[in-house]
Amino acid sequence: MKKIMNAAGVVAASLTLMAGSALAQDPDLVVFDWPGYEDPEFFGTYTEKHGAEPTFAFFGEEEEAFQKLRAGFPADAVRPCSPSVPKWIEAGIIQPLDTSRIDRWDDLNPNMRDVAAFQKDGEYYFLPADYGNTGMTYNTELLSEADVQSLKAFADPKHAGRISIADNVDDAYALGFLATGVTDWTDATDEQFQAASDFLRAVHPNVLTYWADGASLAMLMQSGEVYMSWAWNETYFTMSLEGHPIAMKRDTDEGSSSWFCGLVHSATAEGSTDKFYDFLNAWMEDYVATYIVEWWGYGHSNVVSAGVSSELLEAAGLDSSPDLDAKTLFQGPVNSQLRERMIAEFELIKAGF
């Protein structure tokens, strides 16, 4: 893989983050987000215009964010991933977007933008922003490609204590469904849901830990404690750049998964609506689309319009092909009943039940 960052670049990025964090926080815009998205490169035009960065608050997973918003937490912009959006709309915790105020709305990937489940009464509620892949990721010095040809390897007792999967219901069930032959979970039957759950129960005894973020997983894989993971392409991307022996195999027998997240306007918002849209527009800038691929290994809903190179996308593990697409489970919205069952069952599985 072509290395698209070097040590000097990493230092420069770190200095940028440090400089950004020294700026004042704008009390008129509260962004409720995943940790890490306070990177000032994502909203540079906002900071330039207002002379301060937004105020950030963080959540560890989306059900936590949902419960806090439902309890009245006063956030303005929030970043859920696509499966959660219908539930959030139904619960009334987010409000419609004024798409006329989003400058690059027409440039966004329509497959992410125009999903019917993100709309209600003719209005849009979700601005797709970033995306990535989740797939079989492994230490190439400790495992061969043959060892990871099938996702069923996650449930093989010989790997006990050496694997990790995400502490994330969507990624976990993407693995469960794929391993049991389902690439479209939107219409999953009771039998398919049960088969996916049974597979995750078979995986559980092999799990050293359920990773919460890419950085913690990278540490486990660098140490060799974990040599096989169901991981975001960020882990493969960053560890490869650092010279670690790692590969991401998206073309397993059963395939891999893709996901995307975005920004919504909370119904509990107390800040400036003008600044909310300035923040959204900052995220849609062309340079952000290139930056998030080059430095984070994630995609952007505006990569085509922004002209992000195919070489850069391939280096980040974001390339696409008919063969890969045919075996990709797209983590799109699911009906609220199935989603609630997934959430409840995953908590039981992690607890050993």
Image (cartoon, grey):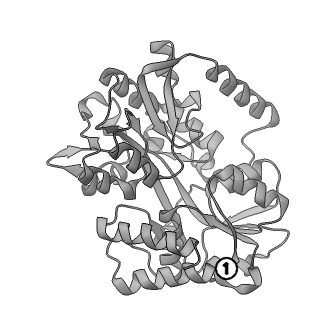
Foreground of the two, 258 or 175: 175
Would you identify the image quadrant in which residue 151 lies? bottom right
- Name the residue at 37% across, 32% down: 76
Under circle 1, the secondary element is helix
Q: Position of residue 86 (x, y in %)?
A: 29, 56
Q: Is residue 157 above or below residue 208?
A: below
Neighbourhood count class around disc 1 (C-alpha, 10 Å): few under 14, some 14–19, many 20 upward = some
* Residue extending farthest left: 121
Instruction: State left or right for residue 335 relative to residue 10.
Output: left
Foreground of the two, 183 or 17: 17
Instruction: State left or right for residue 237 relative to residue 227.
Output: left
Q: Is residue 106 above or below residue 83?
A: above
- Name the residue at 44% across, 41% down: 302
Q: Position of residue 244 (x, y in %)?
A: 82, 56
- Name the residue at 54% across, 75% down: 349
Q: Position of residue 336 (x, y in %)?
A: 30, 65
Q: What residue is pinned by disc 1?
A: 205
Query: Label 1 is placed on what type of residue?
Result: Pro
Foreground of the two, 172 or 123: 172
Any part of residue 52 in sight: yes
Q: Is residue 141 above or below residue 219?
A: below
The C terminus lies in which quarter of the figure? bottom right
Instruction: State left or right for residue 202 relative to residue 28.
Output: right
The N terminus lies in which quarter of the figure? bottom right
Q: Position of residue 131 (x, y in %)?
A: 49, 51
Any part of residue 128 in sight: no
